[in-house]
Amino acid sequence: MESHFRVRTIEHSTGEKSPMLFSRSDGLPDSLANDWKIERRSVTHSHQSLRQELFAVAFFYDVARSRNWNLSELFDSGNGLTWEMLATLREDCGRWHTDVMCRQESMRLMSSGIQKFRLDVIRKFCVWRLETVRQRIFGSGRLAESVNVIHNIDRHKNALKTSQVESRRRLGLTPSGINALQNLVDPTSPSNPFQSRFRLRNFLMVQLLLEYGLRRGELLGLRTSDVDYRAKRPKICVYRRPDEKIEKRISV
């Protein structure tokens, strides 16, 4: 079963791309999720990052729908999710989307990295919704209620917190692994698996990754104009171009 929500990318006349969350049932945009997204954009998050975060919010909405949780009522009251709901949500974040939607007790668990990402995004979204309510209550002078919302915000932060152990720490290549990789991509190596016309380029790409620790999107987004080799100390400049029409990470 597919999600009840979808993420669409809106391209403005300025060339800026903006992802938005829509309901599949009526085709209308979700005002709360999109308002949150706009604030996230102001924190210099790229289009692709915001898009993935909206998918996580859509997952949260689908979990609530399958569990018959009235999110509007829960958050507008300033209470948010109960401890039991938070525990259920934490477990569901580790499941496949279709399994959650069908209410199956499936053991097909997602990777810990995806679970951590979902929890991080949903935690930020829940805290944002409760903080919005707190500001409205505080502005009306109801201090006692405002303090109660602060308590509920902390409860969500603690219940949806993820640890480094849960996210399965990434391990880099060993020195022997680096040597083996460099020998393999050496343009003169008889074991080089690439076509001769690509060998020098691929060798250079591997060296840039190893020497500068570039991300794959940064590497694939480099242009010749980003290399300043005429200066006394030659340098490579990595620029953030979040609204490019081509997704560099998959254009290989």
Image (cartoon, rainbow, N blue to C red):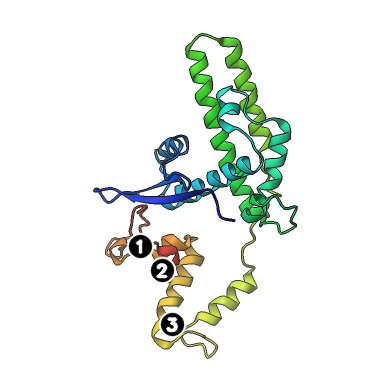
- Residue type highlighted by circle 1: Ile
Label 1 packing within 10 angstroms: few (<14), some (14-19), many (20+) = few
Q: What residue is rendered at 41% in x and 80% in y?
A: 200
Label 2 packing within 10 angstroms: few (<14), some (14-19), many (20+) = few
**Disc 3 secondary structure class:** helix
Number of the front mark, 2 or 3:
2
Residue 209 is marked as none
Mark 3 or mark 2, which is nearer the start of the sequence? Answer: 3
**As drawn, which residue projects farthest toward the bottom?**
190
**Figure quadrant of the C terminus:** bottom left
Residue behind mark 1: 246
**Disc 1 secondary structure class:** loop
Q: What residue is rendered at 35% in x and 57% in y?
A: 237
In the drawing, does residue 25 fall left or right of residue 42? right
Given residues 107 and 222, the one toward you in this image is 107
In the drawing, does residue 230 fall left or right of residue 56? left
- Residue type highlighted by circle 2: Ser
Q: What residue is rendered at 35% in x and 60% in y?
A: 235
The image quarter containing residue 76 is top right
Q: What residue is rendered at 69% in x and 43% in y?
A: 90
Where is residue 65? Give x, y as percent: 61, 41
In the displayed structure, 108 sits above or below 199; it is: above
Q: How far separated are the C-alphas under marks 1 and 3? A: 24 Å
In the displayed structure, 187 sits above or below 80; it is: below
Residue behind mark 3: 199
Where is residue 104? Give x, y as percent: 72, 53
- Residue type highlighted by circle 3: Arg
Q: How far separated are the C-alphas under marks 2 and 3? A: 18 Å
Given residues 80 and 242, the one toward you in this image is 80
Residue behind mark 2: 251
